[in-house]
Structures are given as C-alpha cells and as structure tokens.
Image (tube, coloured by chain):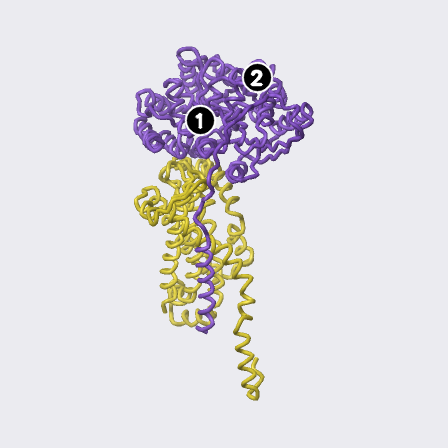
Amino acid sequence: MDDGTSTVGRSASRRSARSGWVPYAYLAPALLLYGGFLLFPLGRAAQYSLFDWDGLGESTFVGLDNYVAILYDERLREAFWHALVLVFFYAVLPLAIGLLLAALLTRSQVRGLGFFRSVIFLPQVIAMVVVAVTWRQIYAPDGPLNAFLRLIGLGALTRPWLGDYTFTLPAVGLIGTWVCTGLVTVLLMAGMSRVPRELYEAARLDGSGPVREFFAITLPTVRGEITVALTLTIVAALKTFDLVYVTTSGGPGTSTTVPSFEIYRRAFQLGDVGVATTVGIVLTVVVFAINGVVNMVGDRK
Amino acid sequence: MKSHIRPSAAALGGVALILALAGCAPGNGAAENPESSGEISTDISDVGDVTLTVWDQEVRGGQNEQMEQLNAAFMEKYPNVTIERNSQSFDDLATTLRLALTDADAPDVVQANNGRNTMGQFVAGGQLRPLDDYADAYGWFDRYSPSVVQYSTYSDDAKVFGDGNLYGLPQVGEVVGVFYSKSKLAGLGLEVPADWSAFDEALAAAAGAGETPLLLGNIEKWPALHVFGPLQGDHVDADVITDLGLGNSGQSWTTPENVAAATSLRDWVDAGYFNDGVNGTDYDAAWQALASGDGVFLIGGSWLAADLDDAMGDDVGFFVPNRADGTPATTGGTGLPFTITSAADNTDVAAAYIDFITSDEAMEVLAETGNLPVNRASELAPSSGVMADVFTVFGEVTANGSLLPYLDYATPTFADTMGQSLQDLLAGQVTPAEFTEALEADYAEFVAANG
C-alpha cells in the first residue's frame, strides 16, 4: 500500500484520515443491525428481568427478586439439569463418533467420499422442526423403531419412546446426536486433511500403529476444530427449544423440560414476563461461561 | 491495533447503554374505565351511517361461510351500517387482541376467549362493556341456557368467573363425548352404553374379545383432560366441578369424590383398556386408529366429528353416558363469545349485531354451514350421520344435563398442572390421591391470591 519513502508526511496524514471515521462508516450498517436486533433486545431483557410484569398491565420494580426466585425453583433446576444431559448427547457423543468417522474417512481410500460427506452432513441442512416431526413418527408406539425392534426379536425393548419417564430424555438427546454428528464430522475432516501424508509415513516407519497415529498426530492437529465443534454444539444443546417443543412439550410430566422451553412457557403461556427474561439472562450467562471454559482449554498450548 | 479496537468497543458499549437507559419501564399503559351506559335502544335503523369494526377468528371453511352470510344479511337489513371485518386465526387474534384493546382506535366487537387469562383480564382491565341491559332488552337470557351463559359471565373485578355481568355471547357449542365404531360394537353384541356402569361393562367386554377398548393419544398432555372431565362428571357434583373449573373459591380437589374419579381412570389403565403407550401417542394418531378399525371407543370433543365422519362415514357414532340419576354431565363449552369493547362508538349497533348473529335464524345458518349451533341444536340436527348424534347430545346436555367447564379455565397455570398430573397418573407415577393433591395446590394458591 505504501508508495515509498518520499512522502512520509502525506502518507501519515492519509492513514490518520483513514483510521478516523471511514472504518466506522463501513462498520455502521452491520453495527446498527447488530445493535438493533441483538444488543438492544438483550439490554431490554436484562431490564425486564428486574420487573414483575404480566406483559399486559403495569409493572413493578422488584430488583433482583426474580433472580433469587429462580434459584429456589425446583422446576428450573430440573430444566438446567436436562440441558446438561443434552450437552452430552449434542456435543460429547457427536465428537466421539465424529472423530472416529472423520479419521476413517480421511485415512482410508473410500470411493465416493463426497457422497458420504454429504449424507453425514444432511441432518444439518434440514429444518429442526422437520427433523422433530420426523423423529416423532419414528418414535411413535407403532412407529418404525418399535416395528424394527419387533422384527429382529427385541420386542421386549419396545416402549412409547416419547412417553416414557426414563427414556424420553435420551431419546430426544439422540435426535440431537444425529443432527450434530454431521457438522462435527465435516469440521474434523477438514482439519484432518491438513495433515501431510508424510507425517503418517514417518510415524509408520517409527513403528506406531493406527491407534498411536491417531493420538500422536491426528488428535493434536484438529485441536482447533474440536474447540469450534464443541462451542457450536454446546450452544445448540443449551438453547434447544424447537426439538422439545415439537416432540414432547417437556413431557411426560416434566421429564424433558429445558430452559428455553421454560422461558417460552412462562412468557407466553403464564404471562410471567419478568421471570421468563430472568431465565433467559441466566441461560445466556451459562452459555457464555461453559463456552469460555471450552475455549480456554482448547486454546491452551 | 489496541487503539483501533477500543473506540469501537466503547461505541458498542455506549450504544447498548443508551438504548437500555432510553427504554422506559415495561407496560405503563393505564386501563380505561368503562363508560357508564346511558339510554340504550334496540332500534338502530335511524342512527345514520355507521361503520362497525368486528374482529373475529372464524377463518375456517364453514365458520367463515356462516360469518360472511350473516354479515351480508345484517348489512342488507340495516343499509346504514357498514361492517368492517377483520378475521384472523385463533392464535393470531389471541396475541394481537391485547394490544388492540388498549389502543384508542379499538374495534367495536371482538371475539374474546372465555378463560381467566383472556376475557377475565380484559374485564379486570375495564376493556369490555357489560351487556346485561341489552340482554334484558333483547331477551338473551331466554335464548341461552344458563350453563352456556355462565362461561361469558364475570364479576366487575373479574375475581368471580361464572357469575355476575354478562360480557359476550357465543355462536357455536362444543361437547366432549364418546365416539365409537358401530360395526365393532355390533360385533361385540353390545348396545350403545346408556350410563357409566354400562360403559364400564362394554370396555370389559371389548377387552375380553381382544379389542383395544379405549383409544387415547396423550403426548400433547391436554387430551387426557377430555377423558378425565366426563369421568369426573360421573363422580362429582356438577356445581362443585363448575367452581373448581372456573377457579372460584370454596371447593377442594382432595375430596373422596375427586379421588374416586381419578381412581376410575387409573383402574382403566390397570385393566389394560387403553392402547399401549398413551403418553407417547399422538392425539391425531388415536382418532385415526379408531377410523382404521384399531379400537372400539374414543373419548373426544365434537370438533373431531367432521374428520371422523369423512373417514368412517356411517360407521361412527357419538354418545355421552348418563350419570346414575339418568342425566348426562360432560365437559363442553362454547365457541369464542362476541363481546363489545368499552371503546365502541355506538353500542346500540354493536348489540344489534350480536343479537343478529346469535338469533334463532342465525342458528339455522350455522347448522347449514356445518357448525354446531349453541342454541336449538336438537331441532336443527341433520337427519343422519355422526353430526346428528353430536347435535342431539349437545342439545340434551345443555337442556337437561350439565355442561361442565374445561378444567384448564381454572387458573392461568392449570392447563399445565393438569396436563402433567394426568400424564403422571396414567403412567402410574403418582397415586390418585397424590394427583388430586397436585391439583389442589395449584387451585388453592390461585384462590388465595385472588382474594
């Protein structure tokens, strides 16, 4: 960019002009949108969380009472616990499956790699509501899953998958696993393809097997991708709403309620806007905290 | 680089802070008081040119058709009145109505849902006009059965539901009863059960013959309310259920009668009368199973009649078992009542409109367009088919029996509490006694807070 040494003064003044308002003019449209549709609602939510308000009439300022109230709300504790269980199904399980799949697909000479990659990624492309409706059919008492179990002689295992107090949460979680595995796998494959083949050959010459190769070469290489994958999937797990809303509405009983569903229920069904926004703010903080830890661990050299 | 980031972060923070501070406290709109009503008149032919704004939710086929016919007939009768109709789906109306009513330019006539969280809140906020003077002038209390009218009735402060001022009139009715397959019943050699003990015997006979006696899809949580409702009507006094269902004080859920009703439901589960996995079955899948011949009985609302009629034709029937005293008592209700807002410019015209669309002649239009008219159902019943059964049952229940409220009207949280508790009861997670205690907790808390 710099045109040489002769015009230092001009160059400096031009740079200072450029670093004045011009960059912000470029940023302004995005900043306005971001501020208007994200920061402003977030600020309003934080404000609402300090009020007792039914969404209709007058509001009363109650300070931090809403935050104290949700600490003692057993139903919300349960919802947050369910969200943590979903983190296992959305993030941990897909990561394990994704590492295995990605390692297999990149290392082996599979024909039609693009096809497999597309198939694995497909669940990511489908709208979550469609996914939920489909799986609701699959899990129905007379649905394909139970029919399959009966066919292979495991009729004893059949159950109403979305109406069982023990198995509904894992059943919903496995839908998340199905959805997230594709994303994780494709991310990891991109990372693994960076590893030069010579490195594996060298390791092979040094006498290490496939397992050793995986832990010594592959895993450290994709550390960055793992961090990204975990961040995305953990956020998805903690803010799950559509999946639960469509499949179970939090039931049977309260066995699959999650924080986002509780926010919706309190704000729109019970007309308790203050507490609903409080839960929203707390959920936001929790998401930031968990992902902060993930990124701290992930970035550590 | 640092110096480049800092101003932008500061700007961001500044924008956020300014926006947060600029926002005023939520919900500072004050409720207006209803104007005291002066002279009223039932003759609106000489009021001059008037525009009447009506918000309804009659968007589906037959609903929309009857509304269009009646509106056209009204404007023909009173050429000086122009109806400006705004029709939206039930859900859309529910979300927009709150804002619209507080607006200075509010509509004149609106359809408002009966429950405490809608009509109750509007009444408390002074946004609806009491209609008792017009009811006397037009004779509405003679036209309507008291068990129907009560669902549009609140006290001034909306603390009492089901008694006090009249705030609206519905056009159509709803009733919960038992759908059955005529061929299945004939195959079992059974008559249509006349009362609840005969119904129990029929269930046992169907189970003995290897059929699925009773179909239920309860993944949505609310469908079981419609099974428990009629069953409760067999065990508990209609007055008690009405108080419990409308969230009025002075009753209790933990009575032996309510426990007995819950025990009956639990006994049906234990006897294996229901299809497998009711809590994991779709509501729609359950009635479709009846249509495809996979069960004998299905307890559900009259709104299913049209679909079942399409699917099963003459094979489907509808009835309500009588109580021991020979009268029917079952869950039911009305379509959304038409109300007059406090902001209405000309209440005489608005009242004339409501009178017109709920008149005896209007009931004929409703029946012709495939709706269940709230009045004259028995005499307007079609000659055959399941709709004929539905009309007859509704007429019988409103005339001689008790139309029990939907139990989730009771408190703002009751739909939730009841839905979960019924899932728990059906799955055997709680005993019938624990079930009634969970409901009592919600009811008692609301009644106490309501003063």
Q: Work out whether mark 1 precedes mark 2 in sequence or the reverse, and give the earlier one.
A: 1
- In the image, residue B380 sits, relative to residue A152, either above or below, namely above
Q: Residue B152 location, x and y as percent?
A: 48, 25
The residue sitting at the front extreme is: B38
Which chain does the yellow colour mark? A
Residue at image mark 2: B388
Q: Which residue is drawn at 42% across and 19% down?
A: B203
Tell me the CA gap for discs 1 and 2: 33 Å
**Which of the chains bears the disc numbered 1?**
B
Q: Residue B344 location, x and y as percent?
A: 56, 32
Q: Residues within 10 Å of mark 2 (few under 14, many from 20)?
A: some
- In the image, residue A186 sits, relative to residue B385, either above or below, namely below
Q: Quadrant of the N terminus of chain A?
A: bottom right
Along the line of sight, which residue is nearer the eye, A202 or A179?
A179
Which chain does the purple colour mark? B
The kind of residue on which mark 1 rests is Tyr
Answer yes or no: is residue A24 visible: yes
The kind of residue on which mark 2 rests is Ala
Q: Residues within 10 Å of mark 1 (few under 14, many from 20)?
A: many
Residue at image mark 1: B154
Secondary-structure class at tag 1: strand
Q: Residue B370 location, x and y as percent?
A: 60, 23
* Image mark count: 2
**Which of the chains bears the disc numbered 2?**
B
Answer yes or no: is residue A170 visible: no
Q: Residue A274 location, x and y as percent?
A: 40, 45
Along the line of sight, which residue is nearer the eye, B401 or B421?
B401
Q: Which quadrant would residue B409 be assigned to in this image?
A: top left
Q: Tell if the residue under mark 1 belongs to the same chain as the one under mark 2.
A: yes
